Amino acid sequence: MKSFFKMVFASALGAFIACIILSILSIIIFTGIAASIGSTSSYRLQKGSILKVNLNGVIDERDHTGPFDFLFKGSSIEMQGLNNMLSAIQKAKDNDNIKGIYLNSGSGLLITGFATLEPIRKALLDFKKSGKFVVAYGENFNQQAYYVCSVADQVFLNPQGILDFRGLATSIQFNKGIFDKWGIEMQVYKVGTYKSAVEPYIQDKMSDANREQTTAYLNDIWETLMTGVSEVRSISIEQLNHYADECMTFARPDTLVEYKLIDGLKYADEVDSYLKGLLDLKEDAKLKWVEVKDMKAVPENKAKGGKDKIALLYAEGVIASDEANNLFSGTNITAKEYVKEINKLKEDKNVKAVIFRVNSPGGSAFASEQIWHAVKELREVKPVVVSMGDYAASGGYYISCGANKIVSEPTTLTGSIGIFGLIPNGAQLAKKMGATYDGVATNKYANFGGGTLSIPLAGIGLLPARPLTNEEGAMVQAYIERGYDLFLSRCAEGRGKTKEEINTIGQGRVWTGNQALQLGLVDELGGIDVAIKSAAELAGTTNYSLDEYPVQKDFFTSLLESSSENMSEQMAKIFMGNEVYEQKRMMGAWSNYDYRQAILPEAF
């Protein structure tokens, strides 16, 4: 027996040492990679340059740099930060070395909400006031890319290209039938007639309430888009809708020119020739391109402000209490991190006001409450202005409602003041698999929710193996209702309304920024620029600099934190075993169960 334990210990120690060695080797390897791809050399802007803005891929709130981003270098899906794009356009306007902007739609795969595109579009319209040109070209245009590119002086399409112009729609997959076949029942506990996030789990089609709210916000967004396109293309909204009903996606390219949606059909080399003509260059001359990423090294013409600072705190993603590091640059709004960030800004005497940039479809109600409290404490010391992105719904609205002022884009999706809980019941699936359960308990509710169905040997925990009893269900519903009542209280306090007034426009209903302004859920329409101006006015300062938070981690910090997190997980698996580890993790998740406020479906 002694030799057996020696063997087990030796094996565990060997695995431990191997993990350490592999981690060290990984750091060495990625250090070499970082030296070649992570360093940035100084960029010198040449006279007669053209700023190329790529509208192809994903645009997040800000540029994210993760330790494994180089794996996606050269991918057709580009990841960009809205902050960098807006800064680049502003610098291009003020810099005499840049003569114009080239909007490149590429293959037309711009995957971004319209509220994120709105400030880019406004920045381009402002750029045109300088008298410099804006030219757009695409092999194809989707509706997002066309909305931005429509502001250009000339919009060119490849002679064999496509303009996807057909209106907005939403399509939701309802999975109740799948769960029924598997033997899984979804137990729903919610407050809010319009709280529709649970519907795909328990229904086979949209409820009347969900259809009503979705129709309302899609039509409002589409009207906003058509108003914008109508103004710059000089085509009536009525005519634009007529074109959409014809489904321009499959129209002949020359028809798009005839309808004045497109100014001309050109191949890429022909567009280059057109640009050379604008710059009075010879045909054999080379165009001088500058990318958005290059503009980060170009100084601003305007001098930085004094010691006063206005902080721009970005909050993007699902709201959660805490999370492990994401290796691939994904983002979540974690209460642990953001409470700490907000408290730092509260204590920093040089920070005179805070802009809270929220782009979130919701998440944990508990985490939202913690962030709300931190924002409330911050507001007592200095002004807080919320700037809403594509989403600031449910949990996203919860963390926003305590600010001095809320600014949103017309197409922002916000509101959704409601709460739900979703607990699966795997009793029938457990029966099909042949699993049975037995046990003992010291008290009546000690085994609340029952055991967890798991796959033997594989160590994969799936879901609770029995339904909640009537008494257990009543407890959860009461818990949800208390959460909703608290949500109403927070919104009423922040917006200067009664709980009854908030409940009337709450009930989980989603509103656009346009609608939210009329209802008093937001104070003004606009982007980050409007929020900055408001924050400065509230703080009574005109001489300030703008600093972004959270301070972004460099390559090495992200890599080391990721390695540390993986090491801890691997060691736990070694000493506990995969099966026990997975069961403990699953049971921990259920014991820390937190109702959710919203996760919106894809709007379009």
Image (spheres, rainbow, N blue to C red):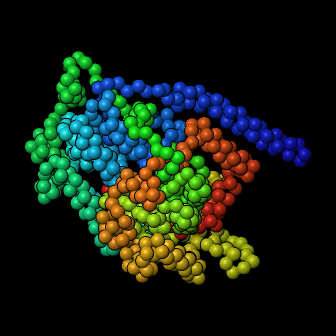
| Vertical relation: 348 (above or below) 80 | below
Give the residue at the far top of this rendering.
284
Q: Is residue 115 left or right of residue 141?
A: right
Q: Quadrant of residue 536?
A: bottom left
- Which residue is rendered at x = 59% and y = 48% of the image? 325
| Residue at the right extreme of this rendering | 2
Callout count: 0
Which quarter of the rendered picture does the C terminus lie within?
A: bottom left
Q: In the image, residue 423 lies at what x, y percent?
A: 53, 69
Asked if 282 appears above or below 401 in the picture, the reply is above
Is the residue 77 above or below the residue 402 in the image?
above
- At which x and y percent is residue 197? 42, 66
Horizontal side, residue 96 vs residue 271: left or right: right
Residue 558 point in image, percent of width and height: 59, 41
Q: Position of residue 322 (x, y in %)?
A: 59, 57
Nearer-the-camera pick, 114 or 85: 85
What residue is at 52 percent from the left and 29 percent from the top? Answer: 39
Q: Please give left or right for residue 237 compared with residue 327 in the image.
A: left
